[in-house]
Image: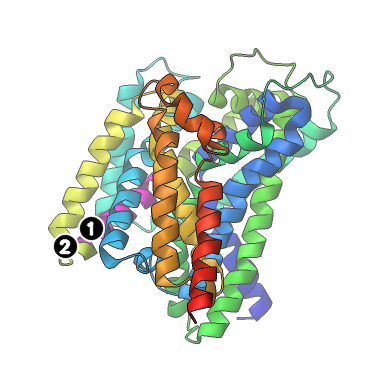
């Protein structure tokens, strides 16, 4: 195969892996709230929803291993615990969210049925596909993503060029920070450390055995995937901002995406998008359940029974959590994201920087510091925030849920200088 063609094919495949249909509901409401500050919020969103995930792919290009390799410099035990947490969070939050998005976009507008019924049928089908390893979904996925992208580009182009009411002033106090934190909800940084390993295996199966050849292909395909994500996310944020005067202020995420598609494409286009998003959500859910089941199967002696039990447990969790509305799932995800995302981000960055700056001691020091200083960030979603006010006031950026950033950076520099002095 022509090398340029292979880079583009890998780039589109990587784009499809990151392009979770559930993520589409996040950018429009962000733009809707940011309004005239939509570009600033788009930059913040891109930092955690595009740049960090693509850096995870670059880290895989250097490591060329598995998810376990990301944290092994901290300690083997830490890395195993980290991997288990990643997969537990994946089946407990983003997988059920796909069922909730499907209900609100594709079922609720046409049928007055309860969400529990939708999630029960949805995850019963997910379990069937996960246990039978059908290739139908992988084939379907190849067609779904291009179709959704085409429709979204139409929404963006029509939305940007349409004559809409003047954009009102934004209600966000810190648009850049809001964009950064909303980017957590895409789960794409977590996705990056997981799907990067899948990309490595697929390249090996296609005959790429040399380290440098795989590294070059991954980096270039990552750039293509990242560019595509930026265009889609920024476009949806922009359209959400431009139509901010056309919808009520209390509109939810799924209703806004459906409303924007109706405003730009009419009822047929809106219905078509809803069906495609539902199908794409389904393929994402199957991918998460099978990936998690595969991990625990490998962890526990390559047992097929473990695979089945994990898939069944994952689908039961999916039925329960997926029966709630999207907004509720996003809200309950916050503590988990505030806990796991900072650690994931520093692991990605430490695996990207040159090895001479990322010794085992640096890994340990930075990860421990990040964990300690991110405790107030996730605790304030569990206990009364006023109890943490005095602590938050003393930590820079803690009021913005980024209290771990400066301490982690300071420790990174300090430990490196200390090691350089000892050398």
Task: Tell me what residue is drawn at x 36 percent, y 45 percent.
Answer: 90
Determine the secondary structure under disc 1: helix
Question: How much space separates mark 1 and mark 2, taking CA atoms?
Answer: 6 Å
Badge 2 is on which residue? 300
Task: Tell me what residue is drawn at x 44 percent, y 42 percent.
Answer: 374
Q: Give the range drawn in magenta.
A: 285-297
Query: Secondary structure of the magenta portion, mostly?
Result: helix
Badge 1 is on which residue? 296
Q: Which mark is residue 346?
A: none
Determine the secondary structure under disc 2: loop
As displayed, is residue 261 above or below residue 337?
A: above
Q: Foreground residue, 336 or 26?
A: 336
Mark 1 and mark 2 in contact? Answer it, CB < 8 Å: yes
Residue 153 seen from this side? yes
Find residue 274 and report its horizontal and vertical position in percent. 54, 32
Magenta stretch encompasses residue 287: yes
Task: Tell me what residue is drawn at x 56 percent, y 33 percent.
Answer: 400
As displayed, is residue 53 above or below residue 278?
A: below
In this rendering, would 232 be left or right of 305? right
């Amino acid at each position: 195969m022509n090398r340029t063609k292979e880079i583009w094919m890998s780039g589109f495949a990587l784009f499809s892996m990151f392009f979770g249909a559930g993520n589409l509901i996040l950018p429009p409401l962000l733009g809707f709230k940011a309004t005239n500050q939509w570009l600033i919020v788009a930059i913040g969103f891109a930092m955690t929803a595009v740049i960090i995930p693509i850096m995870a792919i670059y880290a895989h290009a250097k490591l060329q291993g598995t998810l376990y390799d990301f944290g092994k410099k901290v300690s083997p035990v830490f890395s195993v615990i980290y991997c288990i947490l990643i997969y537990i969070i994946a089946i407990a939050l983003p997988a059920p969210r796909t069922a909730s998005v499907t209900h609100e976009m594709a079922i609720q507008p046409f049928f007055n049925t309860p969400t529990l019924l939708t999630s029960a049928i949805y995850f019963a089908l997910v379990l069937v596909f996960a246990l039978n390893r059908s290739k139908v979904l992988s084939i379907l996925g190849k067609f779904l993503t291009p179709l959704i992208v085409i429709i979204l580009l139409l929404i963006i182009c029509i939305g940007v060029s349409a004559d809409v009411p003047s954009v009102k002033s934004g209600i966000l106090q810190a648009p850049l920070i809001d964009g950064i934190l909303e980017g957590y909800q895409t789960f794409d940084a977590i996705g990056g450390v997981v799907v990067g390993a899948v990309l490595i295996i697929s390249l090996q199966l296609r005959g790429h055995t040399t380290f440098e050849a795989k590294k070059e292909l991954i980096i270039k395909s990552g750039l293509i995937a990242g560019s595509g994500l930026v265009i889609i996310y920024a476009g949806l944020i922009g359209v959400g901002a431009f139509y901010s005067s056309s919808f009520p202020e209390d509109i939810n995420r799924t209703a806004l995406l459906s409303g924007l598609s109706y405003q730009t494409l009419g009822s047929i286009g809106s219905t078509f998008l809803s069906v495609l998003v539902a199908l794409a959500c389904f393929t994402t859910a199957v991918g998460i359940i099978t990936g998690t089941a595969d991990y625990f199967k490998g962890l526990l002696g390559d047992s097929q029974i473990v695979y089945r039990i994990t898939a069944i447990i994952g689908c039961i969790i999916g039925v329960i959590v997926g029966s709630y509305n999207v907004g509720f799932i996003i809200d309950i995800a916050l503590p988990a994201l505030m806990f796991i995302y900072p650690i994931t981000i520093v692991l990605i960055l430490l695996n990207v920087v040159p090895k001479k700056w990322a010794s085992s001691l640096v890994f340990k020091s930075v990860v421990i510091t990040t964990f300690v200083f991110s405790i107030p960030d996730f605790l304030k979603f569990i206990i009364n925030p006023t109890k943490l006010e005095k602590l938050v006031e003393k930590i820079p950026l803690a009021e913005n849920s980024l209290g771990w950033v400066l301490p982690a950076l300071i420790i990174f520099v300090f430990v490196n200088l200390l090691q350089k002095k000892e050398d």
